[in-house]
Amino acid sequence: MGAALVKRLANDGWNVAALARRQDALDELAAACAEAPGRVVVRAHDVHDVADVPDLFEELVRELGGLDMILYAAGVMPAIGEQEYDTVKDLDMLAVNTSGCIAWCNPAADLFRTQRRGTIVGISSIAGDRGRKGNPVYCTSKAAMNTYLEALRNRLGDFGVHVCTIRPGFIDTAMTKGMDGLFWLISADEAAKRILSAARSKANVRYVPFRWLWVGLVIRHIPSFLFRRMTI
């Protein structure tokens, strides 16, 4: 999904910095955007390395000539067995999905506050709406991300900064590959189009596709004694 967002932004004329762990994938992305009107700068980075973020953030802002928007799209959701309680695996989800988001959005929030403009977009999940039995810590990581982004929205609202929380349903990405029972599946490019539309419309929270809003609304209002018996 991150690559699809980069391609759409570059084709719209934005100068974009793209970060990911794999340099070869970044090089392919840069080559795919070579003819786009916007410039794409790539850097290999692992979001576990939060100590590297402040210097790397400043370097990229200088190279881009400023910053108008940051999108945090990194996320992991490993398969979890029904009776599996793996602390190492769980803490890694928190490190990528939550800590990485905070590490990158904090410096962006401070910069946008001082320049009194900017947009922060965090790609969360409908899974953050309730604590599902299938993957407790994935839900936790996304719920924490939702609360953090809401707090940033409230804190930065007086400074002209927009914070947008995206809660996707099922997107055709490496994360969902091989999963059974998926419905309303959309492509990463279609998701990217809808995410950027939400960011530009100044939406605070946007489900992608929008019809997941009604699913989320129903799920949030199911009583706990019933929800614990469900497999969703």
Image (cartoon, rainbow, N blue to C red):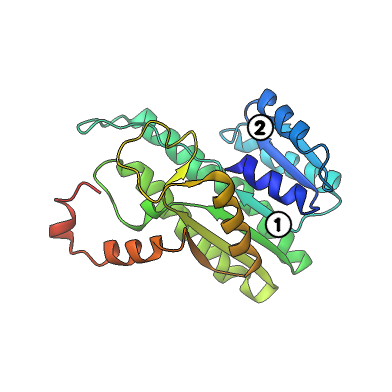
Occupied quadrant, residue 77: top left
Q: Amino acid at mark 2?
A: His
- Identity of the residue drawn at 13% across and 59% down: 225
- Identity of the residue drawn at 58% across and 57% down: 195
- Identity of the residue drawn at 30% across and 43% down: 136
Label annotation for residue 69: 1
Label 1, label 2: how far apart the Cα atoms are: 19 Å
x, y percent for residue 140: 36, 48
x, y percent for residue 44: 69, 30
Count of numbered circles on the image: 2
Q: Residues within 10 Å of mark 1 (few under 14, many from 20)?
A: some
Given this view, does label 1 or label 2 mark the residue nearer the observer?
1
Above or below, 157 relative to 207: below
x, y percent for residue 141: 41, 47
The residue that label 2 is drawn on is 45
Farthest top residue? Answer: 24
Q: Secondary structure at mark 1?
A: strand
Q: Earlier in the sequence, mark 1 or mark 2?
A: 2
Drawn side of residue 77 relative to residue 109, left or right: left
- Between residue 211 and residue 156, name the one nearer to us: 211
Q: Secondary structure at mark 2?
A: loop
Occupied quadrant, residue 26: top right
Drawn side of residue 110 relative to residue 14, left or right: left
Contact, mark 1 vs mark 2 (Cβ under 8 Å): no
